[in-house]
Image: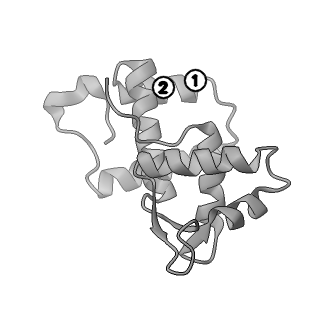
């Protein structure tokens, strides 16, 4: 079985704290403090999830030079990297790897405004310009990378 490398829903809440933070590192205590009011996770659960995020390679840590019980956590994977991995796993799991079918299912069930529709058209145009299309021999798996 393949090792999971993307944050779970609970881990994502913790990563949102890191991604929104101004400093490059945070201790577990700092994360717990910032989580107050956002989640009812216990401090112990936050520490468990920080360890899981480290195991998945999403976070890294260094041990405090003055207190070996304190870890300073830092982000390894950006939000964009995690979103890209999550969306690929979603497409693989629910649409047999077909990006086209995933996009079609999402669009067919979406209630879009005229402006949102135009924004999507612009995104597709940008993809054309930046060569993010697959080669023609591989059309069955979808159109976007």
**Residue at horizontal 74%, vertical 51%?**
43
Q: Is residue 5 above or below residue 96?
A: below
Q: Residues within 10 Å of mark 2 (few under 14, many from 20)?
A: few
Q: Is residue 55 above or below residue 135?
A: below
Which structural element holds mark 1? helix
User: CB of mark 1 within 8 Å of CB of mark 2?
Assistant: yes
Q: Position of residue 115 (x, y in %)?
A: 66, 49
Q: Residues within 10 Å of mark 1 (few under 14, many from 20)?
A: few
Quadrant location of the N terminus?
top left
Which structural element holds mark 2? helix
Q: Is residue 93 above or below residue 135?
A: above
Disc sitting over residue 104 in the figure: 2
The single residue placed furthest to the bottom in the displayed view is 66
Quarter holding residue 108: top right
What whole-number distance in Å separates the C-alpha atoms at marks 1 and 2?
Answer: 6 Å
Q: Position of residue 55 (x, y in %)?
A: 42, 47
Q: Position of residue 132 (x, y in %)?
A: 29, 49
Disc sitting over residue 34 in the figure: none
The single residue placed furthest to the left in the displayed view is 137
Q: Does residue 30 appear in the picture of this structure?
A: yes
Q: Position of residue 118 (x, y in %)?
A: 57, 48
**Along the line of sight, the residue nearer the viewer: 5 or 31:** 31
**Along the line of sight, the residue nearer the viewer: 70 or 49:** 70
Quarter holding residue 133: top left
Disc sitting over residue 108 in the figure: 1
Number of residue marks: 2
Quarter holding residue 67: bottom right
**Residue at horizontal 60%, vertical 70%?**
26
**Along the line of sight, the residue nearer the viewer: 70 or 51:** 70
* Left or right of 129, for residue 104: right
């Amino acid at each position: 079985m393949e090792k999971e490398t993307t944050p779970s829903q609970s881990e994502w809440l913790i990563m949102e704290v890191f991604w929104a933070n101004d400093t490059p590192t945070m201790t577990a205590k700092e994360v717990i403090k910032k989580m107050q009011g956002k989640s009812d996770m216990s401090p112990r659960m936050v520490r468990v999830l920080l360890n899981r995020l480290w195991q998945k390679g999403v976070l890294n840590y260094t041990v405090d030079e003055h207190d070996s019980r304190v870890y300073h956590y830092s982000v390894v994977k950006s939000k964009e990297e995690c979103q890209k991995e999550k969306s690929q796993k979603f497409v693989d799991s629910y649409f047999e790897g077909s990006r086209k079918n995933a996009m079609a299912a999402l669009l067919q069930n979406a209630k879009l405004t005229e402006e949102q529709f135009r924004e999507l058209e612009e995104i597709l145009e940008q993809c054309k310009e930046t060569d993010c299309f697959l080669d023609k021999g591989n059309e069955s798996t979808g159109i976007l990378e």
